[in-house]
């Protein structure tokens, strides 16, 4: 019994860590820039296929791909920011939402054209291996993905809290006018923030591909999942996203151990509905709280 | 009201600016801001006072007109260049970054110095020396401070880049009278250090009390101007009646 | 082309009459075509156009006028389809009879989810609607009376296929005409203005006394009812209902693409957007895959969001605005600008 519980906890934490990086970019872009990037999961999907492509063509291990994805997707994010976001930032919110929605549909369908709708898995040496710690058995793939997630979370937190640029980014999210008045180049920092958000989405895609099967058209489920975590945890703080993701991971592993898989989702949806109903203001109160 | 024209720090000429192209809020405003003095801009809501400040701070591009700092044209320069040339804006309302600590807030005041760490640290340290009570609060989040303390953080943050010209937008809004009067005293002290101050204010009496020269804008145009003595006399009554105070 | 006739006519009574006549002529033409044509493929496609028109107009009420984008319209559609299918399965009732019940089921669900979600501001609502689709899909897989992934079969109508296609053609046509008229009425009502006020500035709307939550709930329930009704009839058309296909996200995405391309927030928008997207898609399908045409439309949507927020309708209105000064000048109405 104790072993079962320990196993659930260990696996739940690992899963939660990976969920955390899947949601982090969404949460930070939302919290700092006030943009709900519905194309977030499309970049997660691209990350997964990047890992697959690098593995198949260049025999690059997903662990390396995780770090390769970061600069690539950072640039992609900065470009998307310049081409699309800067044009809708100041416009009505629905316009930005529709633009990102169009981008999501575009990426998904380009993905389908390039890679068909087949479901893929990434298989490497450690995909089916296990680590045995005393009576505990932990699969290697989630363990590695979890460790990578921790590295990314710590790096992002360190950047946002311990560098001047990071603090300026957070400052910009808290009071844009004041940041401008100090000479902070809000445009450039927004591009950096957006780039970081997309970079973490891409890297999350690599990590998720180590654990879950994936296909272009299933990406939107990750949007739902990431959004769920953001809403459960509140907005824009690395810590709150992490805590909420760990909770979701633990609930999921615990529920899967005792209930049919589908019910896990239902439990989380009910939790989401409850939270939304309880916070009468919805997220309006938290919306402007920054990281 | 004869004005010394030889010493002009900031010279604003025929400034036209607004938020929507073709629909300017300022229709050719002229301001001459003398060095080391407090120049106050008054006017009813919508007169264009804050818009003028935003242009002077480099937030907002002008449609036409000129802004000269010590004779150099700066109207088209971005905000950071304005700060580099010694102009800094204190925006209206609360402007601390609530989730950052006091120290982090103040350090960001030296954003344009970030390339030179030693200078930045020195500048931050100088500001802490100037406001010693902030040193004790340095690790508290700025959002947890009282309104007066937050205002001090904002002024301290403004001073890190050691600006020669301060653009102050409605400094007493939302503050208790005691703290507001402290803020005006602080502005006088900054003037005594030789800094040039351009103050936009709704609190006409308080502003006139510390002003050297006063402009009144209405509907984006110059209405009247004069020195403090003129405004404390008959003109003052005129303006007060006109502004409905 | 014919879209030009749907331009809002602000000046010139003759234009209004012309526009109405054109609308009537098109409607009459479509009725005639449905009755005469024996081209099954064309009738089938047009039937689908009408079906989407209802759902897109439904989306338009809260999404176009109110600015609350629903990315999960298929939820209402699917619930309507399931309501009909279940009523058929257990009570043998024809979906034609139970379509209003299907609509009511969807409306009830719309109200239910509206309570927590419509308190949220626009963007949150949009993402939540996607999540709700997944949740309902799962529910349909797990509820005892829906037969899970097995699905529900309905019996086909005992009539010749041409007649059946015509029947659906006319039913969907009638519903589309009703939906469009309804949205036209909404556009010119206080309810419509309240929605627009919410879209432009919800806080301000609240301050001036718009009962924002009630307006949003009503718009959402109305949209759910319209979509659910169509979903119910769709069940009879498709004859087989199962969770994956019935709750296909494609339907949700298409509806948004169509509305945005045509011009959200105008009654003409969907009338332009739906046939445009579906007919172009139909034409392209001969040469390219449906993914390719989705790529094309998503690029168009991005461009519209960036450069022409009003969609095709917005573009047409812009053209009109540019033409108007010319008209005025010729009528001698322009006032000389005084310098100042």
Image (spheres, coloured by chain):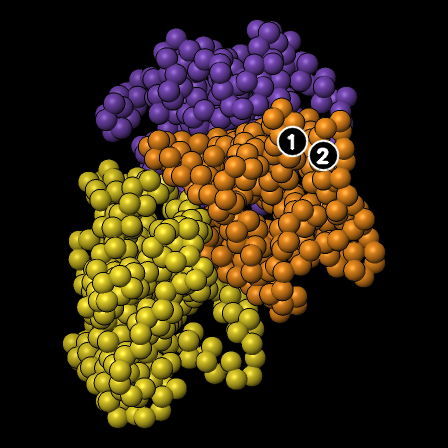
Quadrant of the rendered image containing residue C22? bottom left
What chain is tagged by disc 2?
Answer: A
Q: Colour of chain B?
A: purple
| x and y percentages locating residue B242 in the rendered image | 25, 29
The chain coloured yellow carries which letter?
C
Q: What is the number of callouts on the image?
A: 2
| x and y percentages locating residue A175 in the rendered image | 50, 32
Q: Colour of chain A?
A: orange
Q: Residues within 10 Å of mark 1 (few under 14, many from 20)?
A: some
Residue drawn where x is 50% and y is 60% of the image: A102
Residue drawn where x is 75% and y is 53% of the image: A123
Label at residue A7: 1
SS at mark 1 in the image: helix
* Mark 1 vs mark 2, CA separation in Å: 7 Å
Q: Nearer the viewer, residue A288 or A2?
A: A2
SS at mark 2 in the image: strand
Q: Is residue A50 left or right of residue A101?
A: right
| x and y percentages locating residue B84 in the rendered image | 66, 32
Q: Nearer the viewer, residue C284 or A246?
A: A246
Per the image, the residue denoted by label 2 is: A137
């Amino acid at each position: 019994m104790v072993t079962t519980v320990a196993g659930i906890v260990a696996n739940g934490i690992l899963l939660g860590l990976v969920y955390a990086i899947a949601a982090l970019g969404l949460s930070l872009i939302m919290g700092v820039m006030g943009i709900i990037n519905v194309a977030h999961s499309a970049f997660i999907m691209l990350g997964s296929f990047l890992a697959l492509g690098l593995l198949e063509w260049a025999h690059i291990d997903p662990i390396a791909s995780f770090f390769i994805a970061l600069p690539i997707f950072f640039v992609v994010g900065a470009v998307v920011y310049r081409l699309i976001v800067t044009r809708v930032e100041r416009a009505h919110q629905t316009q930005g939402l529709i633009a990102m929605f169009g981008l999501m549909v575009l990426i998904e369908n380009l993905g389908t054209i390039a890679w068909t709708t087949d479901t893929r898995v990434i298989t490497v040496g450690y995909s089916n291996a296990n680590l045995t710690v005393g009576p505990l058995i932990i699969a290697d793939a989630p363990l590695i993905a979890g460790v990578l997630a921790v590295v990314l979370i710590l790096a992002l937190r360190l950047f946002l809290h311990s560098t001047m640029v990071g603090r300026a980014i957070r400052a910009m999210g808290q009071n844009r006018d004041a940041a401008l008045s100090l000479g902070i180049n809000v445009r450039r920092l927004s591009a950096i923030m957006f780039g970081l958000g997309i970079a973490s989405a891409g890297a999350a895609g690599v990590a998720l591909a180590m654990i879950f099967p994936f296909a272009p058209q299933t990406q939107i489920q990750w949007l739902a999942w990431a959004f769920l975590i953001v809403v459960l945890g509140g907005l824009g703080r690395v810590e709150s996203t992490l805590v909420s993701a760990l909770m979701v991971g633990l609930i999921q592993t615990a529920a899967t151990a005792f209930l049919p898989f589908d019910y896990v989702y239902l439990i989380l949806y009910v939790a989401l509905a409850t939270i939304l109903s309880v916070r009468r203001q919805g997220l309006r109160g938290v919306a402007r709280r920054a990281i | 009201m004869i004005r010394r024209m030889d010493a002009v720090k900031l010279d604003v000429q025929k400034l036209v600016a607004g938020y929507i192209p073709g629909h300017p809020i300022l229709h050719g405003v002229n301001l001459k801001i003398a060095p080391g003095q407090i120049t106050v801009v008054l006017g009813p809501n919508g007169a264009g006072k804050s818009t003028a400040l935003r242009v002077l701070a480099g937030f907002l591009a002008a449609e036409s007109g000129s802004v000269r700092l010590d004779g150099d044209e700066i109207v088209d320069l971005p905000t950071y260049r304005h700060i580099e040339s010694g102009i800094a804006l204190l925006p209206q309302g609360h402007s601390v970054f609530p989730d950052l600590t006091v120290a982090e807030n103040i350090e960001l005041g030296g954003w344009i110095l970030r390339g030179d760490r030693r200078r930045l640290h020195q500048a931050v340290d100088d500001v802490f020396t100037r406001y010693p009570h902030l040193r004790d609060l340095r690790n508290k989040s700025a959002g947890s401070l009282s309104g007066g303390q937050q205002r001090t953080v904002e002024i301290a943050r403004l001073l890190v880049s050691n600006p020669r010209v301060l653009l102050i937008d409605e400094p007493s809004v939302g503050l208790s009278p005691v703290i507001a009067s402290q803020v005006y005293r602080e502005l006088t002290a900054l003037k005594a250090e030789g800094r040039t101050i351009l103050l936009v204010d709704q609190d006409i009496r308080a502003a006139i009390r510390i002003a050297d020269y006063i402009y009144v804008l209405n509907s984006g145009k110059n209405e009247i101007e004069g020195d403090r003595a003129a405004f404390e006399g008959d003109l003052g009554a005129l303006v007060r009646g006109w502004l409905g105070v | 082309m014919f879209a030009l006739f749907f331009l809002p006519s602000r000046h010139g009574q003759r234009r209004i009459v012309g526009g109405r006549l054109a609308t009537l002529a098109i409607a009459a033409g479509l009725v005639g075509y449905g009755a005469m044509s024996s081209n099954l493929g064309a009738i089938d496609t047009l039937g689908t156009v009408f079906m989407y028109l209802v759902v897109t107009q439904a989306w338009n009420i809260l999404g176009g006028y109110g600015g609350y984008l629903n990315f999960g319209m298929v939820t209402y559609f699917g619930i309507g389809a399931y309501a009909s299918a279940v009523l058929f399965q257990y009570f043998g009732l024809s979906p034609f009879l139970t379509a209003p019940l299907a609509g009511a089921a969807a409306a009830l669900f719309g109200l239910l989810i509206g309570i927590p979600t419509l308190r949220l501001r626009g963007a949150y609502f949009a993402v939540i609607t996607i999540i709700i689709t997944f949740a309902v899909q799962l529910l349909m897989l797990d509820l005892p009376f829906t037969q899970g992934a097995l699905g529900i079969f309905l019996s086909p109508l005992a009539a010749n296929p041409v007649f059946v296609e015509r029947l659906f053609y006319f039913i969907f046509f009638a519903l589309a005409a009703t939906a469009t008229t309804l949205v036209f009425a909404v556009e010119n009502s206080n309810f419509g203005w309240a929605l627009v006020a919410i879209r432009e500035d919800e806080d301000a709307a609240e301050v001036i006394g718009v009962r924002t939550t009630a307006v949003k709930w009503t718009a959402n329930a109305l949209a759910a009812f319209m979509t659910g009704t169509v979903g119910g009839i769709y069940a009879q058309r498709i004859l087989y209902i199962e969770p994956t296909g019935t709750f296909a996200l494609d339907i949700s995405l298409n509806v948004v693409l169509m509305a945005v391309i045509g011009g959200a927030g105008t009654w003409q928008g969907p009338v332009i957007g739906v046939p445009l997207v579906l007919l172009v898609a139909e034409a392209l399908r001969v040469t390219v895959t449906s993914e390719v045409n989705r790529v094309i439309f998503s690029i168009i949507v991005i461009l519209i969001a960036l450069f022409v927020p009003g969609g095709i309708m917005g573009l047409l209105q812009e053209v009109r605005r540019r033409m108007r000064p010319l008209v005025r000048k010729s009528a001698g109405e322009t006032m000389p600008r005084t310098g100042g």
